[in-house]
Structures are given as C-alpha cells and as structure tokens.
Amino acid sequence: MNLKLKVWRQPSQEAAGKFEIYDIESVSEDSSFLEMLDILNERLLEKGEGPVHFDHDCREGICGMCSLTIDGIPHGPERATTACQLHMRHFKDGDTITIEPWRAKPFPVVKDLVVDRTAFERIIQSGGYVSVNTGAAPDGNAIPIPKKDADFAMDAAACIGCGACVAACPNASAMLFTSAKASQLNTLPQGRPEKDRRTLAMVSTMDAEGFGNCTNYGECEAVCPKEIKLDMIAKLNRDFAVASVKNLFGKAG
C-alpha cells in the first residue's frame, strides 16, 4: 500500500504545532497502525529527520496508551478497536490519513501525538479505590454478589482509561471514564461503605481538572474501544444526587 500521512507535529507543549505531510510506500495491509508508524519513523531516521512521537505500550488493546485521532475519530474507523489493534487493511491504497493527538484542554500535548493524561490519574487518586486493611487476600466467596451486580461491575472495569471518550466529546467530558471507575466499586459490597465519599470526590476532581459537562451526545460510547455504555453515566448521576443530599444533611458515608 502507498499512503499519504498528514501528521500533527508539535515540538513541545508551549510551541505551536502544524501538520506535516509524509508519503509512505510499500506498507503491508497486515501491519497494525502503530507498526505503520514504526516504519515511517525508521525511514525518517534513515533520512536524518526526527521521528514522530506517539504513545504505545502493550499493543494488545489493554493498556490504553495508543491515544491517536485517526481521520477525526479517536482510535480510528473501526468500532471497539484500539489504535494499536487497527490494521492497515481497513484503509485503501492511495488514501490520505490524518493523524492527530487527543484534542482536549485537560489533555495538553506533550510532543507530536503524545498528550498528558495525568488528569485521569488524579481522578482515580481522589476516590477510585477501596480502603482495606493490609494482609492476606480474603476468600473470593466470602461475600456473595448477585450476578447482575458482578456483570455490571465487570463491564465498568473494562475501561482502560485511554481518553477516547474525552477526545470525542464536544464538551471534552470525562463522565464516561469517571462513571466507569466509580461504578465498578460502587456496585460491589466491598466498595459501598465509601460510595458517597468516593462519588463526591471523583466528580469534584473531574470538574476541577477542567473537563466539560455531559450533555448526552453519545460520542463517548461510540468511540470507546471497550464499548462502555452510557448506563454508567446514568448510575453515576443517581449516585451523585443521593450523595449530595446526604452530604447536605451530614449523612454522607
């Protein structure tokens, strides 16, 4: 395959960025999108030019590092697929492909296609955990959990924190991410003692980080590589309403 790549290049967070055009030839349709970028970088280095910086790690659709906007769509045109699992056979010979970083104020560009997503980490640090005493792991069957609750929690836990939901949302809302991380714990008995405190803290941190409000556009669900549903946001809104009322009367847990 012969392709024309329109790649965002930005040397630093403070510097202005711009698109650069690269022609790349003889790309195998069986290559992954990141392997194609590896080939581009090898050829740039051979010519003495600087490589395109992009995030990657597991390349198995697990870690969420491959934060690329491809032709205007976070992670590219295939649904339920991370950029690292996207293959070049989904493109056509002669295509022009536009590659950009996530576009959201809370995710500032570090360099080229790399963005700083530590805002997500601060949301997790504010409440995305369960406070337990250290020691041996409890027996897995010690607390019976209804299958419906277990399934919902597992669906929420599938979130890999890639940030595609934020990049796709016109408001740069982090509600899908935050709701998945909160609902995972709020649904299970181990997380319910801190449910109110967790919900209030995570939503407060999310707002403080500058993410926008959810207005139910649904783009987040459409681009989520793990197909997290809007049901998570509905649950977070209910939990937040209850926690806010309890907090008003000094009864929040």
Image (cartoon, rainbow, N blue to C red):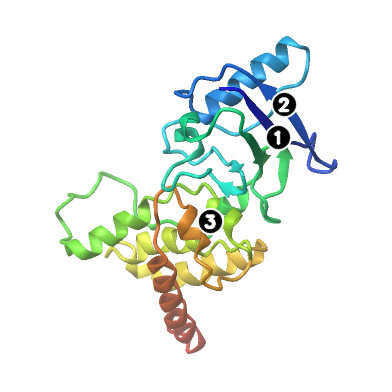
The kind of residue tagged 3 is Cys
Secondary element under disc 2, as helix, strand or loop, is strand
Circle 1 SS class = strand
Mark 1 lies on residue? 7
Residue topped by disc 3 = 165
Q: 66 or 14: which is nearer to us? A: 66
Q: Earlier in the sequence, mark 3 or mark 2?
A: 2
Residue at the spot 59% in from the left edge and 61% down from the top edge = 169
Instruction: Provide residue 78's location: percent of width, then percent of height.
Output: 46, 44
Residues marked 1 and 2 touching at CB (< 8 Å): yes
Q: Is residue 127 left or right of residue 103?
A: left
Q: Position of residue 190 (x, y in %)?
A: 29, 61
Q: Which mark is in front, 1 or 2?
A: 2
Residue 22: give its label: 2
Q: Is residue 171 above or below residue 16?
A: below
Task: Name the amino acid, label 1.
Answer: Val
Relative to residue 9, is residue 124 drawn left or right? left
Local crowd size for mark 3, using a 10 Å CA cut-off: few (<14), some (14–19), many (≥20):
many
Rendered image: mark on residue 131:
none
The amino acid type of the residue labelled 2 equals: Tyr
| Residue at 17%, 49% in the rendered image | 139
Disc 3 to disc 2, C-alpha distance? 28 Å
| Residue 126 position within the rendered picture, expressed as x and y whole percent measured from the top left | 53, 60
Above or below: residue 45 compared with residue 160: above
How would you rate the neighbour count of disc 1 (Cα within 10 Å): few for under 14, some for 14-19, many for 20 or more? many
- Indicate the secondary structure of the residue bearing disc 3: helix
